[in-house]
Amino acid sequence: MSKKKTEKDEEKVTDETSVDTKEEEKEEVNPLEKELTDTKEQLLRVTAEYANFRKRSEKEKSETFSFATAKAVEQILSVVDNLERALASEHEDYEGLKKGVQMTYDGLLASFEKLGVTAYGESGEQFDPNLHNAVMHVEDDSLDANVITDVFQKGYKINDKVVRPAMVKTAN
């Protein structure tokens, strides 16, 4: 009987050893598989975060554009109101009309100033091809080279960005 017990005990030990060996092999494979799975999950999360960031950035960009447009229109609406009042007036007073147009013009320039828009291009200034569009040229020895003699259309810029170049006539 003792032989039978010993054989059974040995079989159990052998079975347990083989089970342990299989589990160890699984544990050796599992860390690699686990790392691969974790990396895949991390990649999916990063991809989703990037897609959300892109959507959020696009939304913020469109909202900023809409907000800036609304602010610009808000500044110019007072000019529109003044022009509507001038058109509704039935007086034939030329001086009054001229004064109203001058006030409307001044209001528009004030609105531009609030928006950061500045006018440029005056006679006597030095010609700069980045800011001015020369449409005519005159030879005049009494003037310096590349001097603006006439301004046909003022230029406008916001901060340092040219919105419209000045249309000018240059000398020499």
Image (cartoon, rainbow, N blue to C red):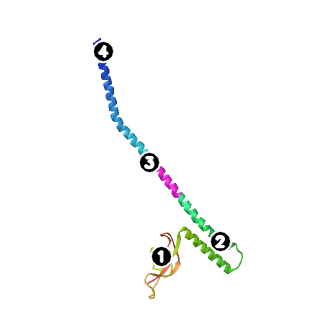
Measuring from the top left, give residue 54's x and y in whole percent.
Answer: 47, 53
Q: What SS does tag 2 mark?
A: helix
Q: Amino acid at mark 2?
A: Asn
The tag earlier along the polypeptide, 2 or 3, is 3
Up-down: is 120 above or below 142?
Answer: above
Measuring from the top left, give residue 69's x and y in whole percent.
Answer: 56, 63
On-image quarter of the N terminus: top left
Residues at circles 3 and 1 in contact by the CB criterion of under 8 Å: no
Quarter where residue 71 is shown:
bottom right
Q: Cα distance, mark 4 to mark 2?
A: 112 Å
Up-down: is 11 above or below 116?
Answer: above
Up-down: is 155 above or below 9?
Answer: below
Residue shown at the point (34%, 35%) measured from the top left: 29
Q: Cα distance, mark 3 to mark 1?
A: 48 Å
Q: Cα distance, mark 3 to mark 4?
A: 61 Å
> Within 10 angstroms of label 3, few (less than 14), some, or many (20 or more) residues?
few
The tag earlier along the polypeptide, 2 or 1, is 2
User: Which residue is labeled 3 in the image?
Assistant: 47
Q: What SS does tag 3 mark?
A: helix
Q: Amino acid at mark 1?
A: His
Query: Is residue 18 left or right of 119 when viewed as pictured?
Result: left
User: Which residue is labeled 1 in the image?
Assistant: 132
The tag earlier along the polypeptide, 4 or 2, is 4
Q: What SS does tag 1 mark?
A: strand
Residues at circles 3 and 4 in contact by the CB criterion of under 8 Å: no
